[in-house]
Image (tube, rainbow, N blue to C red):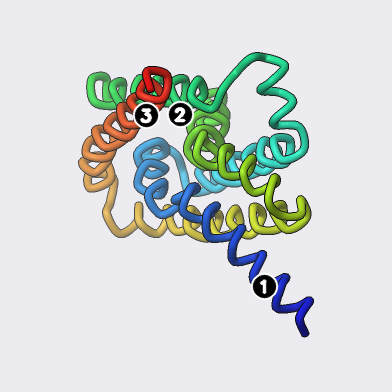
């Protein structure tokens, strides 16, 4: 009984920080903005590939993340600034040009799945930092399990994107995409700001 309670406690203590860091609910409107030109089937393919890439990145980072950062001389703050710059450029392109990517092209859809969906939106600096901290405090199997459960929740949320497109229509999605592109740029500025302030501090 005590063992089961300890497992449940550890699951809660590893699941909740990752859920907050991943913030999949906020990613859904950005997903809509990125994929509003795609057919339902292609959007599902992008979502599936993005979560597979995110899973692979997270698992690699759980196992050898610290070693990679040390070897390359990269800090979490470096990752924040770099990720923020990518998101800012994507948001600015949507606002100015009207598209973050040429989503009709197969290569464009493949790129969307990797950047920015898989990283830095699903598994970004906040998630990677949380994984680093948790693997220092809890068993790696528990951290991995909590990470996978969070990805499954992300998949369930992202799968609703097709329904939202059908409800809102292309015009509604296009209008929202402008709003959320601005939000994405603001998130990017906040990430860059945190990274720079950490350097200064």
Label 3 Cα neighbours within 10 Å, binned few <14 / some 14-19 / many ≥20:
some
Q: Nearer the viewer, mark 2 or mark 3?
A: 3
Q: Is residue 41 above or below residue 152?
A: above
Q: Determine the secondary structure under disc 3.
A: helix
Q: Nearer the viewer, mark 2 or mark 1?
A: 1
Q: Is residue 92 above or below residue 167?
A: above
Q: Determine the secondary structure under disc 2.
A: loop
In the image, taking residue 116 as reference, residue 15 lies left or right, namely right
In the image, taking residue 3 as reference, residue 65 lies left or right, namely left
> Whole-percent x and y of residue 25?
41, 54
Identified at 46% across, 27% down, the residue is 80
Identified at 64% across, 14% down, the residue is 73
In the image, taking residue 170 as reference, residue 157 lies left or right, namely right
Identify the residue under disc 1: 8
Residue 104 image label: 2
* The one of 118 and 140 positioned closer to us in this rendering: 140
What's the distance in space between the residues labelled 3 and 1, CA to CA?
A: 33 Å
> Whole-percent x and y of residue 184?
32, 34
Hey, which quadrant is residue 55 in on the image?
top right
Q: Residue furthest top?
A: 72
Identify the residue under disc 3: 194
What's the distance in space between the residues labelled 2 and 1, CA to CA?
A: 45 Å
Identified at 27% across, 39% down, the residue is 180
Marks 2 and 1, the one that precedes in the sequence: 1
In the image, taking residue 49 as reference, residue 94 lies left or right, namely left
Label 2 Cα neighbours within 10 Å, binned few <14 / some 14-19 / many ≥20:
some
* The one of 19 and 106 positioned closer to us in this rendering: 19
């Amino acid at each position: 009984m005590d063992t089961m309670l300890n497992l449940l406690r550890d699951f809660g203590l590893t699941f909740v920080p990752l859920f907050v860091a991943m913030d999949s609910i906020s990613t859904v409107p950005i997903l809509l903005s990125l994929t509003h030109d795609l057919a339902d089937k292609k959007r599902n393919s992008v979502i599936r590939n993005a979560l597979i890439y995110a899973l692979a990145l997270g698992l690699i980072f759980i196992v050898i993340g610290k070693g990679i950062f040390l070897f390359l001389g990269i800090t979490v703050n470096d990752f924040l600034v770099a990720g923020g710059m990518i998101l800012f450029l994507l948001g600015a392109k949507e606002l100015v040009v009207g598209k973050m990517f040429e989503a009709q092209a197969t290569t464009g859809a493949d790129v969307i799945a990797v950047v920015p969906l898989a990283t830095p939106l699903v598994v970004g600096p906040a998630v990677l930092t949380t994984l680093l901290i948790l693997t220092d405090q809890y068993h790696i199997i528990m951290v991995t399990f909590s990470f996978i459960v969070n990805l499954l929740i992300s998949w369930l949320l992202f799968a609703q994107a097709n329904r939202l497109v059908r409800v809102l229509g292309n015009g509604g999605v296009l209008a929202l995409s402008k709003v959320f592109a601005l939000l994405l740029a603001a998130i990017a500025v906040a990430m860059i700001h945190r990274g720079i302030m950490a350097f200064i501090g």
